[in-house]
Image (cartoon, rainbow, N blue to C red):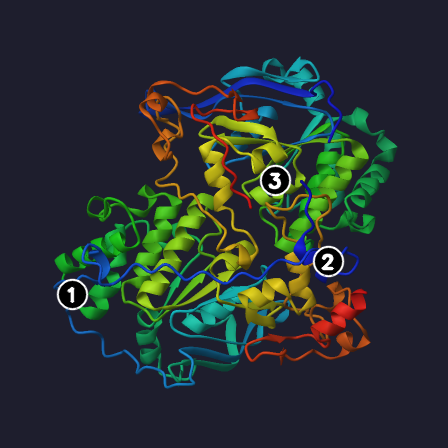
Amino acid sequence: MTQPNPYQQQWPGQPAAQQWPEQPAPAPVVAGWDDPNRGGWDTPTAAWSTPPSRARVTQPRSGEHLLDVRDLRVEFDTRDGVARVVNGVSFHVDPGETLAILGESGSGKSVTAQAVMGILDTPPAVVRGGQVLFGGEDLLTVSPDRRRQVRGQEIAMVFQDALSALNPVFPVGWQISEALRSRRGIGKADARRRAIELMDMVQIPASADRVDDYPHEFSGGMRQRVMIAMALAMRPKVLIADEPTTALDVTVQAQIMDLLATLRAELEMALILITHDLGVVADVADRITVMYAGRVVEQADVHTLYASPAHPYTRGLLASVPRLDHRGHGLHSISGTPPNPTAIPDGCAFHPRCPWAQQMCRMTSPALTRIGRLDRASACHFPPEALDARLA
Amino acid sequence: MPVLREPILRVENAVKHFPISRGVVLPKKVGAVKAVDGVSFELRPGETLGLVGESGCGKSTLAKLLMRLETPTAGRAYLKGHDLFRMRSGDLRRLRRSMQMVMQDPYTSLNPRMTVADIVGEPFDIHPEAAPKGNRDQAVRELLDQVGLSPEHANRYPHQFSGGQRQRIGIARALALRPEVIICDEPVSALDVSVQAQVVNLLERLQDELGLAYIFIAHDLSVVRHISDRIAVMYLGRIVETGTSDQVYLRPTHPYTQALLSAVPVPDPTARARRQIIRLTGDVPSPADPPSGCRFRTRCWKAQPRCASEEPPLSQRAVDPHPSACHYAELHQVIA
């Protein structure tokens, strides 16, 4: 059964394909807080009723975003010269929303996340400019103490490789509750009980028996759940997940993505999902920021991005994904390779690989400009209509 | 579709058990990890067999068995009529000319101290009859050209190349001896999407030009779907379902295949509402102690008492004409 790839219509030299009908997004499934049988996470316990940390910031005023990153620039000093790894990246995220930052390796997506978290190794990394506004407060200029309060408590992170992110010589329960003990000052017995609750919340079976097990005794999927439990211990408002499922099998990946989506809705967190996987993004994201060579090349909501990608890079990326439901010879591929961050091409960083490139693209770097609606932008000299017209 | 010809490779009941021993001074065998536990399949010239399954299902061990990088515990594998599993060094080396391998990680599978020319030309040192002495440089240049690398790059070192280019070097090395079968163990898993497509297209082009047969091992079911003529789905060391690409993907009858396919993310947000993901609970059981009867029964939603006592054979089921190892095989379309 051969079907045309619906994305190929956006790429030159491809035959036109059928239009796919628009379908409304399904409502997220939220397990109710008021369900008496739920137990677990939000059930008041002695530990949970300890007064919340004073570090909580005030709710953002209307019109402000929970987390607003503006024109972030990060450079690395290397032997081969200065690597401009993040080069003016802006995005924002609000409570209860999932933002996906999509990019290939070397696009600067992980460094962006680390800069927002404040866990960049400096040196070699240097934050050259920009703002990370959290509740109106610029995290790049606050005192180290304040930064430390926000990190982990307000903005938490889940890393890709759970085995190397967890400490092999401490039991998982100890690691999950470490922040509660050191920051909230709760006792050992309470901490252990809270760790079990958190493990229940992330659906680790037999949590009471496994709380004293070590990371190597867990499977990959369970370890990733431990990481999530650890990140959620302080009930952060923003959760950054850096390639949380890349090392996992598809069946486990589906479980973890489900869990993240459920928790995001239940806890009304903002979720920033950093990934290279277009399939995962299509499943869970509300909005997408596409990065290439340290810049944002396109921003759109998930349906718009997949239905009518504006930037040539996004178009190429979508056309090169093999799909289960489409079989046929010849995958579309983007020629060439992503640029080295120490030698980003002049003008538009994508121009050496872009089939639409013109003289202008080699000279000037296109700014991220709005297209149509307010939340949609693309960093290309040519509006999507012009690109489409040149296909004909 | 390839013309149905005599299989070039026939594997019968391949078994690999890794012993678990206890004690340092006098090690005692206390059990075995049954990594591959009775796998049979055929590969015809010019066709691609996709081997899929979760990590730990034995697909990479199977690849190593076929290359005789691991010594099989039992079974037979006939490559062009010769039993690979019973061969001794000299004969084996000659036979290996017909079957080569592309490794998963292009960063560790190339020696960083060797130039590209040395890497790609090394097979000629082992098989001098494959290229006359004076012609080797020429042969290496042709190989590089064939995989889309510039022959001028022959004197560079692997670190000067990107991941996709390194994988091309690995493919050139595998092509050097003009094999008839290439085993690709996760050849594109380490690559970015846009580069992955380039390598997949290269593999398809080489197959058309040279009539190669591939065993394509991957955990990414979309890539396998794209490149394979036939598919074998593995679970805990056994093949649970096999058939043509369309049979396995469009008309899966084994519950494990159905669950696996349903979990693959579809890069289309409009499909969110249509998608029905079959959630598997729990993890893959340990291959050192697989469940009795059907190995999938501990995670299967259809499991009956019969599944625990009687192992379902991989045989033709009434619902669809392709082999499936389930007592209760039924058709369930997962891909919209």
Residue A160 image-quadrant placement:
bottom left
Cα distance between the residues tagged 1 and 3? 51 Å
From the viewer's side, name the closer residue of A140 and B157. Answer: A140
Q: Position of residue B207 (x, y in %)?
A: 75, 35
Q: Residue at x 70, y 40 (%)?
A: B171
Q: Position of residue A197 (x, y in %)?
A: 22, 55
Residue B223 image-quadrant placement:
top right
Closer mark to the observer between disc 2 and disc 3 = 3
Cα distance between the residues tagged 1 and 2? 55 Å
Helix, strand or loop at mark 2: loop
Q: Amino acid at mark 3?
A: Val
Q: Residue at x 66, y 55 (%)?
A: A6
Q: Residue at x 78, y 48 (%)?
A: B148
Height in image: A124 above or below B313? below
Which residue has dot 2 on it? A336
Which residue has dot 1 on it? A186
The reply, left or right, for residue A377 in relation to residue A222 is: right
Q: Residue at x 17, y 68 (%)?
A: A185
Closer mark to the observer between disc 1 and disc 3 = 3
Q: Amino acid at mark 2?
A: Gly
The answer for which chain carries disc 1 is A
The answer for which chain carries disc 3 is B
Q: Residues within 10 Å of mark 3 (few under 14, many from 20)?
A: many
Helix, strand or loop at mark 3: helix
Mark 1 vs mark 2: same chain?
yes
Which residue has dot 3 on it? B224
Height in image: B218 above or below A314? above
Residue A286 visible here: yes
Residue B119 visible here: no
Q: Position of residue A262 (x, y in %)?
A: 36, 59
